[in-house]
Image (cartoon, rainbow, N blue to C red):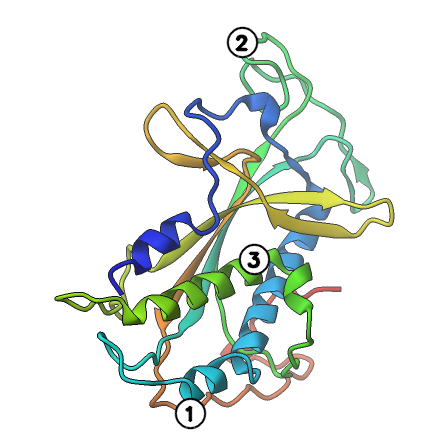
Amino acid sequence: MRKLFAIAAMIVFVVQGCASTSFKDLKPISQTDIYKVIAEVKRQLGVYTAYQRSPLGYPSVIANSRTKVCGNGLLGFDIVSVKMELLSTSEGTVSAGVAVSPVPVGGGAVGGSVGASQVTTDSQVLLIQEEVSLSSKALDYQPGALENAPIAKAMVNLWSAALQSGGDASDICLKLKQGSTDANTFKMSINVVKGINGKVSVGLAPVTLTGGGEFKGTTGNTITVKFEPHDFRQPPPPRPRPCLPRDTRPECQKHFIPA
């Protein structure tokens, strides 16, 4: 298990040089597409949770459990929250009947050349953190679904690498800390592409190393998944009842529902 965290750090990120991210490389998302992006991220995380429940997921882990140097192979990562940092722009956005025109702003803003005195593309950063919970309806995992869900595929690869490292010879063992506030996270830089049909696709993007030694997504858009170790002693939690109109139960105060 001692290789777990090294593998987690390397599995998705590709460092391209040591220069800081250039403003011209950032990719703001139209405000009208922001919630399409959020819905697509949610869909991909749902592919991961469906994979966990499928025969390829936890049932397979239990069936292949065996004596190892550390533990017996009962290892899993349950997503508990996701933080999204999305760079948006109102240029060209039409929302609620209001057309937003480009507004000149000071130099150095996203979209203009570095050091320019005037640029026409505005930008805003939307930073949200969402708890992850079961919906009222389970979706079965479909074979090949990971190929269209790169975020889910990255999480599965992380899980697979951790399982494979359990047999490595070591004088110590490591165990994921339950309830950690500042760890057990997986940060991914994402790239958003909008097709001619208006459909939004979300893939993984490279990161760069800033002058201060911090990893930053080259597009300006990142998601950070927080996970906890799976408790194999507990049965799967029940799904909530569907919410009725004007239902004021706390579990009905949910949003970011895909179209």
Residue 256 visible to the viewer: no
For the C terminus, the image quarter is bottom right
Residue 171 visible to the viewer: yes
What type is the residue that disc 3 sits on?
Ile
Q: In which quarter of the image is residue 78?
A: bottom left
- On residue 115, which mark appears? 2
Front-most of residues 147 and 63: 63
For the N terminus, the image quarter is bottom left
Contact between labelled residues 1 and 3, with CB atoms less than 8 Å apart:
no
Front-most of residues 117 and 96: 117
> Which secondary structure, mark 3?
helix
Q: Please give the residue where the numbered disc 3 appears in the rendered image.
A: 151
x and y percent of residue 118 in the render?
A: 63, 11
Question: Tag 3: Cα neighbours inside 10 Å, few (<14), some, or many (≥20)?
Answer: many
> Which secondary structure, mark 1?
loop
Viewer-side label of 1, 2: 1
Contact between labelled residues 3 and 2, with CB atoms less than 8 Å apart:
no
What type is the residue that disc 2 sits on?
Gly
- Label 3 and label 1: CA atoms lie apart by 26 Å
Q: Please give the residue where the numbered disc 1 appears in the rendered image.
A: 235
